[in-house]
Amino acid sequence: MNTVADKKPRLTTSAMIASIASEGQRVKAAPFGKALVEYAANHPEVVGMTADLAKYTDLHLFAQAHPERFFQMGMAEQLLMAAAGGMAKEGLVPFATTYAVFGTRRAYDFIHQVIAEENLNVKICCALPGLTTGYGPSHQATEDIAMMRGIPGLTIVDPCDALDIEQAVPQIAEHKGPVYMRLLRGNVPLVLDEYDYRFELGKAKLLRDGNEVLVISSGFMTMRALEVADTLRADNIGVAVLHCPTIKPLDEAAIVEAVRYKHRLVVVAENHSVVGGLGEAVASALLRHRVQPAGFQLAGLPDSFLDAGALPTLHERYGISRDALARRVKNWLG
């Protein structure tokens, strides 16, 4: 059931579970938890695991529906990943959830050595990716994709909205091998249903076309890119949006196709540091395929430790709000 985001209260330091939905925006509640419950109903091999964060990753819905397949590992992310690897060795399909900072920084060696090296069938789903919390660098996973891209054989997914998440869950479950998915939880915006969109693991999708700018984006920055396209249309600036929900393996063919035959500015928009994320992956692909756009810019987070504060304020400060991104694009166009 679709709902509309409540009117936002006076801005204060952002809560841990802050929603990125704008006032009046359509949202769906707990799309990850609901999709996993639905898939697991017919797949008894699926188990749910978390490091004391079931409620804050929407895994509590799985725990209620399938209590015999739910494992609470406590505040021990290394143990969570090691145990998930052990369960995968026994033929189960663990979905392990925590916050992105804990799942990557604290548990990196266990993901690398226990799960990825043996290509185990573990699905790591981490909430609060990038700048989706106002609690400062200790909880802002602005470098998680950069860290995880370096692990051989690890698939990385960065969904845009509730529809993306709902459709990604069964596909990552059926994918053979480890997956890291950035997780939006709570009341998640719903935008892609207006674009005849279907998630396909490993595929990028052109959501709209435009002659002046091509925005290549992932995560909720695709939502921002679509908003910017509407905003700049009033200035007769055509903005195309290529959504890349799978960061690794990257759909290089779709990116090259979108860039090669049109002389337009390319902007890579991501909720991640400009170091080591989608932007650098796209730049590498274009260079290797000898494709040169009219211009190339990164609209990501700066290579710095970010401030704490209210999310709308921080998104504006660091250039990833709708208005800030629109201004950046217009400035780059000159």
Image: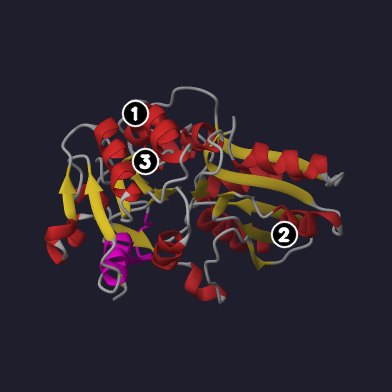
What is the x, y in percent for residue 67? 12, 60
Q: Could you tell me which secondary element the residue under label 1 belongs to?
A: loop
Q: Find residue 155 and report its horizontal and vertical position in percent.
A: 52, 48
Q: CA distance from mark 2 to mark 3?
A: 32 Å
| Span colored in magenta | 21-40
First reached walking from the N terminus: tag 2 or tag 1? 2
Q: As rendered, which of 54 and 261 lies closer to the eye?
A: 54
Task: Please name the amino acid that badge 3 sits on.
Answer: Leu
Q: Nearer the viewer, residue 70 or 221?
A: 70
Percent position of residue 299, x then y: 61, 40
Residue 322 lies within the magenta run: no
Question: What residue is shown with label 3?
Answer: 311
Q: Which residue is mark 2?
A: 254
Q: Helix or strand or loop: what does disc 3 sit on?
A: helix
Does the residue at mark 2 contact the one at mark 1 (Cβ under 8 Å)?
Answer: no
Task: Quadrant for the N terminus, please.
Answer: bottom left
Vertical arrangement, residue 183 with respect to residue 318, above or below? below
Which quadrant is home to the C terminus?
Answer: top right
- Is 115 placed above or below 24 here? above
* 2 or 3: mark nearer the eye: 2
Q: Earlier in the sequence, mark 2 or mark 3?
A: 2
Q: Residues within 10 Å of mark 3 (few under 14, many from 20)?
A: many
Nearer the observer, 8 or 180: 180
Q: Amino acid at mark 1?
A: Ala
Kindly identify the amino acid type of the residue bearing the numbered disc 2.
Answer: Ala
Q: What is the CA distance from the residue labelled 1 to the residue labelled 3?
A: 9 Å
CA separation in Å, label 2 and label 1:
37 Å
Residue at the disc numbered 1 = 308
